[in-house]
Image (cartoon, grey):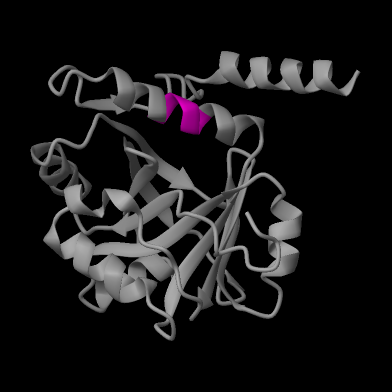
Amino acid sequence: MAMNNPFSAPVDQLGIVVPDLEAAVGEWLERGVGPFLTVRSVVVSGYEYRGNPSKPILDVAFAQKGEVQLELIHQTNGAPSAYRDFIAAGGNGFHHFGWFCEAYQGALAAAEGKAVLQKGSWTGIHFVYYETADPVSAPAELGALGEATRAAVMTASTAGAIKIAELIELNDTSRAVFALIREAAAAWDGKTNPVRPLLSPGGVLHVAADVISYKLKRWLRSR
């Protein structure tokens, strides 16, 4: 990712905000996108919306299509957030672009001066949403994402259009989570277990072993 413009690299994620998560997941499965890994009742730590603290509760589903991750988001309470306001304004579908940042602090520094829409963290993965008019390269996978999503992404990607751009921290946890999502898509037969929990019944990330592995590899590289 070019640090002089953190939004110039190819898009890693499309954020899709929906009023009904089950219905949205079903529509994507019908397009052949899946499986979806879901997590319920997400509480974002340190969340701020337009500079004010808030506590939105979210149900989220992740899937992978080619090089692009899809994140479906449904807010289940009425706390102030960009998601709530999008739905209240009649929105349903594509909401934001996302980039996974190896040099997260450097990306934040490069984005300095752009309007911060919201920020927070989940399971130690930090993120910031910005409002920007910078052009964005539309992902190659658009052809498989449906007409409404394709049109919304193309409209937002142009220079001068106000768009929402999210910078997402890549750390041991997020690398393991994102790898799990990619691997599930690569191994999926299009039928088996189309919707799966991202968390174990005890509320622990299924990728705990992968997180430990990433930390060990990083420690070995540092020696």
Which quarter of the picture shows residue 170? top right
Indicate the position of residue 51 as horizontal and vertical percent values.
62, 76
| Residue 173 sits above or below residue 17 on the image | above
- Is any part of residue 181 visible from this angle? yes
Asked if 213 appears above or below 61 in the picture, the reply is above
Drawn side of residue 101 relative to residue 105, left or right: left
Q: Number of marks in the image?
A: 0
Q: Magenta span has 122?
A: no
- The residue that appears at 40% across and 29% down in the rendered structure is 182
Whether residue 179 is in magenta: the answer is: yes
Instruction: Give the residue displayed 36% in from the left and 47% down from the top.
Output: 71
Pick out the residue farthest to the bottom. Answer: 160
Q: Give the range drawn in magenta.
A: 177-181
In the depicted structure, whether residue 97 falls above or below residue 161:
above
- Coordinates of residue 64 in the picture (x, y in percent): 33, 37
Q: Position of residue 80 (x, y in %)?
A: 44, 71
Q: Main secondary structure of the magenta part?
A: helix
Please give the name of the residue rendered at 62% of the width and 54% of the height, measured from the top-left corner.
1
